[in-house]
Amino acid sequence: MTTTQTPTDPTEPLDVRPTPLALLLLGRESDPRSERGVDCPGDLPAPSDPDLVARARAAKARLGEKVFILGHHYQRDEVIEFADVTGDSFKLARDAAARPDAEYIVFCGVHFMAESADILTSDAQQVILPDLAAGCSMADMASAEQVAECWDVLTDAGVAGVTVPVSYMNSSADIKAFTGRHGGTICTSSNARRALEWAFEQGEKVLFLPDQHLGRNTAVREMGLSLDDCVVYNPHKPGGGLTAEQLRDAKMILWRGHCSVHGRFSLESVEDVRARIPGINVLVHPECKHEVVSAADHVGSTEHIIKMLDEAPAGSAWALGTELNLVRRLAKAHPDKQIVFLDKTVCFCSTMNRIDLPHLVWTLENLADGKSVNRIQVDADTEHFAKLALEQMLALP
Ligand code: SF4
């Protein structure tokens, strides 16, 4: 039997809807089930308001010592201008904990960072995220249900008892709590090697969440494991897409997650920049793909990248494989060096960029009026176990 397709009637509405992620990237709607949170309530000032900078200054001055503003390195310049301190997610959470007098910690970053700050600060302090829809696509790639299911798969394969979870800081509080419940540790891109070395002393295998690239790059490049020692657990496939035998043979079970910003850099971008600027140093973040990291001259965390450029000789040339707001600021801070973005296309962290001046003004003005808005609060049970995993990281040798 043959079927004929009728041509689509152009007047008939098509049943094609943008995905929640596409809507979020377009700055519309939200995905309340995900780590990103929900839309901001209230009326935001117009982005074209010429008084935004003056309003932010005035509200911050009214709040005085009551507010402490944290600015992640990937934030826009207009937001960084108001930050009391800048840094990566872990440094900022610790900075917040070191300011117990500040009633409000305004975290200009993404949702999982604000959660970590809430875990590490006292109950008397409120952690505020200026836009609740500022999430992290990588953190969203590992939900609590998916990870619990994965642990069942490892249990059925007979390997859960010898597996230690190691979770990247860039994960939700739920995933950090899972890690704490199962005797694991959190890591950052600066201490991932130490975390893995510790984990391999506690067990035979590591379940690395949620960034497969950081896990693979650390295990293979820094610890001498082979690519064959690593398997990738795909939460969208039954059993993670792996056989029990593959799980038993593996040393590193990598969660199938990645950063949508650092995952964009390719081997071609490295080859291309070397052809364009002979002698250039390629410096990339370990969230980049393994082939990119292998081809680069230097690899390091955000703080390491900043330090390397501070110490680089005048006249040297650098191609940076990390977020564009940071690259632009570094280029501006080092006019004596040639600093270029590794990719040819624009590569901001779109969710991080949701925090803008209108959201910051709206937040500060509400706080100054005594109205707490967009508070991020981790429940007590999750906080307890997430803290165990964070404290284990602080105790790493
Ligand atoms: S840069 Fe990547 S890991 Fe960082 S917040 Fe954005 S999506 Fe998440």
Image (cartoon, rainbow, N blue to C red):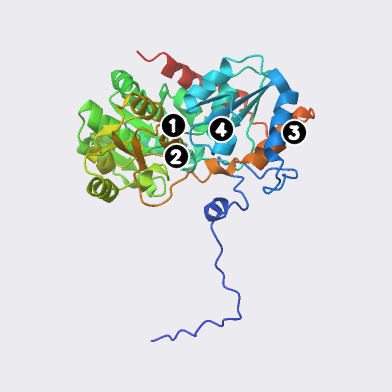
What residue appears at the point 52 percent right and 24 percent down from the top-left corner?
92
Q: Nearer the viewer, residue 232 or 397?
A: 397
Q: Position of residue 76 (x, y in %)?
A: 54, 39
What residue appears at the point 29 percent right and 33 percent down from the top-left corner?
315
> Circles 4 and 1: CB distance less than 8 Å?
no
Q: Earlier in the sequence, mark 1 or mark 3?
A: 1
Of labels 4 and 1, the one closer to you: 1
Per the image, label 4 sits on a secondary structure element best described as: helix
What residue appears at the point 52 percent right and 19 percent down from the top-left corner?
94
> Residue 365 got which mark?
3
Amino acid at the residue labelled 1? Ala
Q: Quadrant of the C terminus?
A: top left
Inter-mark Cα distance, 4 to 2:
13 Å
- Based on the displayed image, in which of its 4 quarters is residue 203 positioned? top left
> Residue 279 got which mark?
none
- Based on the displayed image, in which of its 4 quarters is residue 285 positioned? top left
Of labels 4 and 3, the one closer to you: 4
Of labels 3 and 2, the one closer to you: 2
Inter-mark Cα distance, 3 to 2:
29 Å
Q: Badge 1: few (under 14), some or many (20 or more) residues near its Cα, within 10 Å? A: few
Amino acid at the residue labelled 4? Ile
> Circles 4 and 3: CB distance less than 8 Å?
no
The residue that disc 2 covers is 328
Amino acid at the residue labelled 2? Arg
